[in-house]
Image (cartoon, helix red, strand yellow):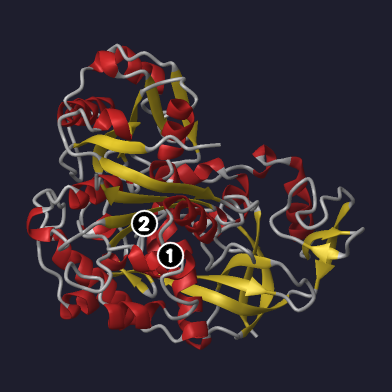
Amino acid sequence: MTTSTTEFPPEFAGFHENARAKRLAFPFCRPCGRFHWYPMPRCPACRGREIEWRPVSGKAEVFSFTRVQHPFDKARTEALPYIVALLTFADAPGVRFVTNIVGDRLDEVKIGQAVEARFTADRNGEPLVVFSVA
Amino acid sequence: MRLEPIAIAGIGETRPVRRSEKGLRALVVEAIEAALADAGLDPSDVDGVVSDGLVMPSTVPRDWVAAQFGFARDYDGGMSFGGAASASAPIHAQLAIGSGLARTLVYYFGVDWGTRASGPYGFHDLYAAKAAFEKPYGFVGQPQYFALWARRYMHQYGLSERDLATIAVTQRRSALLNPLSQATRPLSYEDYFAARMVSEPLRVPDCCLITDGACAFVMTSLERARDLAKAPVRVLGVGFGSEPITGDDVFTQPGGMMRIPGARQAADKALRQAGVTLADVDFAEVYDCFTISCLLQLEEIGFCKRGEGADFIREKGIGIDGGLPVNTHGGLLSHSYLLGVEHVIEAVRQLRGAAGRAQVRDAEIGLVGGLSNPDYGVMILGRDRR
């Protein structure tokens, strides 16, 4: 089941707007100078509300990953196995991003592997940010 | 405040099954009937009804349960959810009985995630960020969350797949000693490694079962429990702990991932109240939704240090005859997956000396740990020594 981005809380919108413009951006709290993830109305570190979307380079590192072999999502049965990874960013400390690693070098995926962003869309045209081995 | 000494006076459970024809509400009624009969109480003796604060209110609400039995609800409560709620339920009894609001409380919990179309995953639809930022990448369920934990833990602390297998294999051995366990076939290391991969590095035996079923237990003052049908099992201490991190973040973000926020807090509170240490605990029923989460909870509760869970399990032994028997009924992995309420039932059974072939010798004190990230509940139960 896919939920339309229009049903999400307003503080989520910046991610999808940036992703449509092929930018990866995360919420950044101006008063305390820290990134956080996921988006929320108040900064989880300082409780401030002056939050902006700050674009990052799209270069990331694998913090953990799993090769999914069970059809949790019936729509993805044909794509099995696929790789879900949790990434960290040198230019956005504090953020861990859930994504897929795609492309033809999947055997090289390991913790610490450098990866870079690729912009795509789901079946409904909603933007997705996936990664490939750098 | 002086805490009223509380006891568990009755326990009830339905036979856990993969799919039940009966319906969840009927299963809950059956479990409560059994718990009252076990305590030798009549529904007219009950004046407080307690469940978790999230799963039961939308499936088997307390008003519905009260109406089925004619229970008075001089106390009515639900805090946290799932496993943390079941393991911290005596907090309600301490408050309600200690303040004079009620004398006898029934706690119940059950799920029909075996028959329900959304299974165990529907629950996470509560969290908007999961829907927006995880589901589109096929990251939709608990086995995947804990797969990321297991992989990272292996990288940081050198955990092996065989260490995870030890938990699954040992608990299966215990499950086969319990007549109600859903898992009925032995599991060898060879079977474990031959099992289907779900989300690497987790295989089918690393993941809990899926169950339809319900459990209930009756809580009253220790004094009153001593006049009832069964020897009371004392609540020596109870604790609840959590961290201010949301269900959205807790599986992946710093502060949540690979930590069980609240476990140490809850354990410290319960142990302090009980006036015992972990060294006094004869067995532990720990929320083993996955092998890796069971191992992490042993660390976070404080049985061993961070990163030493695998060594602890190997050296101490977690089987019935081990140094610290863990999940003596087989746990969520091999007995049933009722989110840990069955761990409470098993702990009471052990302390009554009624666990049959799975009986831990000379069991005097047991610990129950219930997880619902980021919440955690700990109950320390003890034999009534007068």
Quarter of the view holding residue B168: bottom left
> What residue appears at the point 58 percent right and 70 percent down from the top-left corner?
A86
* Quadrant showing the N terminus of chain B: top right
| Amino acid type, residue under disc 2 in the picture | Tyr
Can residue A76 be seen by looking at this rendering?
no
Q: Where residue B231 sits: x, y (%)?
A: 18, 39
> What residue appears at the point 36 percent right and 37 percent down from the top-left corner?
B6
Q: Nearer the viewer, residue B38 or A134?
A: B38
Quarter of the view holding residue B230: top left
Q: Which residue is mark 2?
A: B287
Q: Nearer the viewer, residue B142 or B9?
A: B9
> What residue appears at the point 40 percent right and 59 percent down from the top-left corner?
B276
Q: Is residue B166 above or below residue B173?
A: below
Q: Which residue is mark 1?
A: B297
* Quadrant showing the C terminus of chain B: top left
Q: Where residue B330 sits: x, y (%)?
A: 21, 59
Q: Nearer the viewer, residue B206 or A68?
A: B206
Q: Is residue B264 above or below residue B223?
A: below
Question: Callout 2: helix, strand or loop?
Answer: loop
Q: Nearer the viewer, residue B237 or B338?
A: B237
| Amino acid type, residue under disc 1 in the picture | Gln
Left or right, residue A43 beside residue B32: right
Left or right, residue B314 beside residue B15: right
